[in-house]
Amino acid sequence: MGDASTNGRPETVGNPPATGPAVPGLDEAGLLLDVDGAVATVTLNRPERRNAMTFATWRGLAAIGRSLPAEVRVVVVRGAGPSFSAGIDLGMFSGDGGGLPDGSDAEAADRFIAELQEGYTWLRRPGIVTVAAVHGHAIGAGFQLALSCDIRVIADDAAFCMKEPALGLVPDLTGTKPLVEIAGIGRALELCLTARTVPADEAARIGLAETLVPRDGLDGAVRDLVDALLAVDAGAAAATKRLLWQAAGNTLEAQSAAERREQIGRLRALSAS
Ligand code: CAA
């Protein structure tokens, strides 16, 4: 990273402190946020723990989502060090449980998990395109974070694992829906219920990645993608993202009507400009 072909953007990984809006608590959350014009880069930054995530990480991600400047159009999510993310910090299962709810108060537990899920759901917002740049392991919560992004670019050392069932839990950070939509119910069941590790070539073959590149080509591939995404009209990009994300749940009739609505909006915007 950090070569001359970054189109003037500062590099983030391994180059703290990052720049961007002041989001309190990102250090403790193990996160870096770098905002450069239309591009925000979120870096999971606990490499010594393979970017294992805590409640603070998920709350930090949600805070980033809330504080993203309006001019940001593309968000890149990546990991520092050898892995994208080793998932939940396993230290949270020991001792006093690190504040994990025991489920005895279902309403409180529901609120607690919903708050953590907010760290992931903003990545689907139509006004931004989100890109997961995955290298090394993406396990559990890390796999789900990659699944929350619109597009995944992965290195040939990437390895995905939905570990939660092996720990007696379910994936609950919004990953089950995209996993089924991408891989199909049979493959999603097989991956989750065996908790096996999916290597990069298989991940690309079954649609878990849009682009697979050699490890040393990841940064360049992400840069090229970001540049291509920024070259498209911002309003058209947001409208098209809205359309595409609702397509699977719509009838052809409803989707055709949605296309008409969005196109009328585009025609108005174009004639006003
Ligand atoms: N939590 C806390 N610490 C972790 C961690 C995790 N999830 N993953 C790695 N670390 C720590 C290791 O303990 C180790 O610490 P020390 O140097 O103090 O020994 C350090 O990070 C480096 O780890 P490794 O030496 O194991 O690094 P590696 O590169 O050889 O292997 C790995 C990387 C394959 C990710 C391996 O560390 C691993 O399997 N980690 C556990 C993954 C896991 O089970 N995650 C939980 C998934 S479930 C989930 O995320 C969702 C949920 O809600 C339950």
Image (cartoon, rainbow, N blue to C red):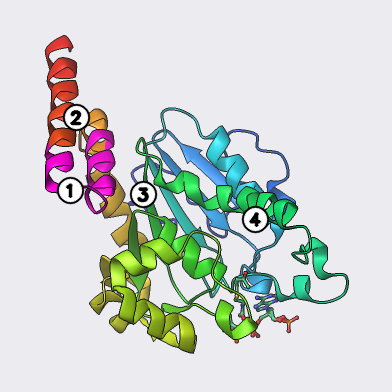
Q: Mark 4, residues whose alpha carbon is within 10 Å: few (<14), some, or many (≥20)? A: some
What residue is disc 3 on?
Answer: 6
First-in-chain label (3 vs 1) = 3
Query: What separation in Å lies between label 3 and label 1 (alpha carbons)?
Result: 42 Å
How far, Cα to Cα, is label 3 from label 4?
A: 38 Å
The residue that appears at 40% across and 55% down in the rendered structure is 149
Looking at marks 1 and 2 on the same chain, the residue that comes earlier in the sequence is marked by: 1
Q: Amino acid type of disc 2? A: Glu
The picture places residue 183, in percent across and down from the top left corner, at: 30, 73
Q: Identify the magenta region.
A: 238-256
Q: Which residue is mark 2?
A: 262
Which residue is label 1 attached to?
Answer: 251
Q: CA distance from mark 1 to mark 2?
A: 16 Å
Q: What type is the residue that disc 3 sits on? A: Thr
Q: Nearer the viewer, mark 1 or mark 4?
A: 1
Of the residues under marks 2 and 3, which one precedes in the sequence?
A: 3
Which amino acid, by three-letter code, is at mark 1? Thr
Q: Is residue 51 magenta-colored?
A: no
Q: What whole-number distance in Å separates the C-alpha atoms at marks 1 and 4?
A: 31 Å
Q: Is residue 240 magenta?
A: yes
Left or right of 84? Residue 47 is right
Query: Of helix, strand and loop, which one carries label 4?
Result: helix
Alpha carbons under labels 4 and 2: distance apart: 34 Å
Q: Position of residue 256 (x, y in %)?
A: 11, 39
Q: Which residue is mark 4?
A: 113
